[in-house]
Amino acid sequence: MDPIELNIFVSRLEAVCDEMGAVLRNAAFSPNIRDRLDFSCAVFDAVGELCAQAAHIPVHLGSMAFAMQGIVSRIEWHPGDMVVLNDPFLGGTHLPDVTLIAPLFFAGRLTAFLVNRAHHADIGASSPGSMPISSRLDEEGRVIPPGKLVRRGEMDQAFLHQLTADNRNPAESAGDFAAQISANRSGLDRLERLVEEWGAGQFQQGLEALNDYGERLARATLSRIPDAEYSFSDLMDDDGQGTYDIPIQVRLNICQGDVMVDFAGTADQVPGNINCPLSVAAAAVFYVFRCLMPPQAPACAGLFRPIRLQAPEGCLLNARRPAAVAAGNVETSTRVVDVILGALKDVLPDEIPAASHGSMNNLAMGSTGSKPWDYYETVGGGMGAGAVGPGLSAVQTHMTNTLNTPIEVVETRFPLRIWRYAVRKGSGGVAKHCGGDGLIREFEFLDTAQVSLLTERRTHQPWGINQGSSGMAGSNLLDESPLPGKCSLQIRQGQRLRIKTPGGGGWNSPR
């Protein structure tokens, strides 16, 4: 396959993922999927190796790439099947992220898989938004082991009822599952046409050429890093259960285009929910090295062949069941990015930025009153500055890629009023290139509600580079009274919650 044919092949695979995402967004019921775009779509080959993905959520896609082979090998597949799961210890991330996998059979042979993963704001946790201050996995909602939601083309209505019956809005939840099924069916249709046009043999040759090309690009990128060992460590603020200043430590061993990422020295798993399954740590590792590669690098299994990682079993980044993991996916993954970037900042000074705001600033809320509702969102912050210029302000960074929920949607769907939504001026690190500023988002509650906050960088500021100042730490306030970074509380009608997110670190001395 010549370079032009390969480029066309890659583009058509990516277009399948893009169309799946468009179908999922347009068919979804919940603002979390339809407005925030908290979902991801990808194509995998017959053994579960990544072939293509849309530019969706890095933590979703990297964890799927790491774990899909183990998932698909467990199932006896038939045409028309779709398997649903969310178990973090079987390749998931956290319970709200529900994965739906559909096999493509061509000429009677298993040829590929179409996969989407979407965040369900209600997955059956006792607290609204299904992001509780938890200490065990079963407190975080419904654990879905791999099971067939669609069998040979027919929806298992009893299974769907089991998944949604206890939710606060079962009709909305069922609608989101239907949207995920529709997205996979769209992908199956488009990919089958592609395989039919190319022929099964040429399609397989295209996948092999794709992965070989990805591996060459990856090795060329990694070979620019001098062979040596690089290390860095950083701290998580706390776990919400009384453990503070929790270290994450990494050593990168670079040798002739190969890299070993070793997290020995990282804290043991903690009572709170900032623990990670290894697939989430892998997603953060893959993300950083993908950012170093050229823009044309295809998202495929070959791109990650030179990268290996290990973390001691039972540590924060390779937790044992039944550890709580709700915030590991959203908070700890961002700190893993920081430590990988920190390890490389001195050897790649023109490419590595300062630390970004380092939190997805998770806010889950709702009520179990006469009109039950639940809502979840993440809030952006400041991006770290780099050699090319200042950091962006008021954006999502690194492991998430979602939008904000428009104020109009929030205020029409939920008993909430947004009093303030503004850039947090001066929160970025002062430097030659200043860090980006964070955000201020202030809610007034028009009814009583239960709220859970899972936020980071409230104690340890995002670091700067080359004497650039650190970004300002974030803060959470209820009627001007400070709140912990991780907490659950009952809020009365008329009270106001203000989230002030961290700024990014600065780059180089202001002088």
Image (cartoon, rainbow, N blue to C red):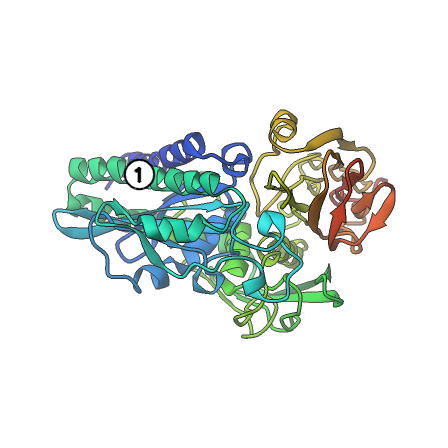
Can residue 429 be seen here? The reply is: yes
The residue carrying mark 1 is: 187
SS assignment at label 1: helix
Residue at image location 57% in from the left, 55% down from the top: 125
Q: Is residue 398 above or below residue 139?
A: above
Specify the amino acid type for callout 1.
Gly
Q: Where residue 249 appears, x then y in whole percent?
A: 65, 66
Pick the front one: 145 or 156: 156
* Residue 70 in the image: above or below residue 352: below
**In this picture, is 121 found above or below 460?**
above
Instruction: Name the quarter where the N terminus is drawn.
Output: top left
Give the number of callouts.
1
* The quadrant where residue 12 appears: top left
- The C terminus appears in which quarter of the rendering? top right
What residue occupies the far left of the structure in this picture? 107
| Residue 127 located left or right of residue 83 | right
Side of 180 relative to 351 (left or right) = left
Locate residue 192, reporting x and y percent: 21, 39
Which residue of the protein is positioned furthest toward the front in this rendering? 370
Q: Is residue 71 left or right of residue 362?
A: left
Disc 1: CA contacts within 10 A as few (<14), some (14-19) or many (>=20): many
Residue 82 position in % (x across, y down): 30, 50
Q: Position of residue 422 (x, y in %)?
A: 76, 30
